[in-house]
Amino acid sequence: MNRCSWVDLNSEIYIKYHDEEWGVSSFDDRYLFEMLILEIFQAGLSFLTVLEKRKYFRLAFDNFDVKKVRNYDDEKIEELLNNKNIIRNKLKITSAINNANVFIKIQKEFGSFSNYIWSFTNNKVIKNYNGIKVAKSPLSDKITYDLKKRGMKFIGSTIIYSYLQAIGIVNDHEKICFKA
């Protein structure tokens, strides 16, 4: 079975992520929040590193319950900074808390975060099977600008482009891939 060339075939976690999640359209706000936070923590690192720590992130971040994350205080931040099982970066941790608050505001305004994020493509998947690897796009630029305007932190067009791929708004599976 052919997969995208970025998949490490020696990593069961990566194979499972590619085969079952990456590029699959999601409309579930809890999952959308999880992936946003994981993409932020991935910045500057391999996504495989994040995937290997994902179960610990779920425990540390209350299964990405946005209402719980938004209320994290200094004591919880300190706990996260001392958690050796996750990526311990204070800026990323405080951004997750800030972004939870913005995420909830967006949910209130649009009825769900899913409604908001999918509105940028009129609920359509962008299929790019051309094999050209890009790190950002006019769409990710536009969404990044809007999220920053709303107050999100530690996001940029590259993070948002990866996020759009992860949640299935952008389908960048390569032509040779069985998921294309």
Image (cartoon, rainbow, N blue to C red):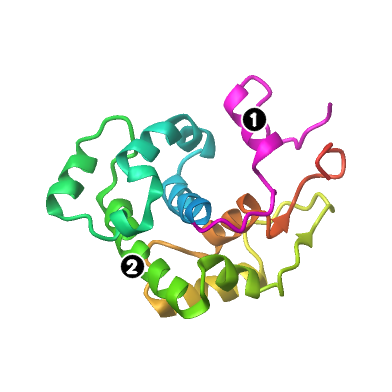
Give x and y (percent) for residue 21. Answer: 64, 42
Q: Give me the residue at 71% from left, 69% from top.
A: 123
Q: Is the residue 7 above or below the residue 92 in the image? A: above
Q: Give me the residue at 75% from left, 67% from top.
A: 124
Q: Determine which quarter of the picture holds residue 70.
A: bottom left
Q: Give me the residue at 80% from left, 41% from top.
A: 179
Give x and y (percent) for residue 71. Answer: 23, 59
What residue did someone put label 2 on? 101
Pointer 2 local density, CA inside 10 Å: few below 14, some 14–19, many at least 20: some
Q: Is residue 9 visible?
A: yes
Question: Principal SS element in the magenta part?
Answer: loop
Give x and y (percent) for residue 100. Answer: 36, 62
Q: Is the residue 110 above or below the residue 174 in the image? A: below
Q: Which residue is more in the foreground, 65 or 34?
A: 65
Give x and y (percent) for residue 77. Answer: 20, 49
**Magenta span contains residue 14:** yes
Question: Is 65 left or right of 123, judged from the image as shown?
Answer: left
What residue did someone put label 1 on? 16
Question: Is 171 left or right of 63, judged from the image as shown?
Answer: right
Q: Quadrant of the C terminus?
A: top right
Give the amino acid at mark 1: Lys
Question: Is 43 left or right of 20, judged from the image as shown?
Answer: left
Q: Give me the residue at 52% from left, 57% from top.
A: 159
Q: Is residue 6 visible?
A: no
**Magenta span contains residue 166:** no
Q: Is the residue 30 above or below the residue 11 in the image? A: below
- Indicate the secondary structure of the residue bearing disc 2: helix
Q: What is the residue that sits farthest to the left in this orientation?
A: 75
Please report whichever mark, 1 or 2, sits nearer to the chain's N-terminal start.
Answer: 1
- Indicate the secondary structure of the residue bearing disc 1: helix
Magenta residues, as a range?
Answer: 1-29
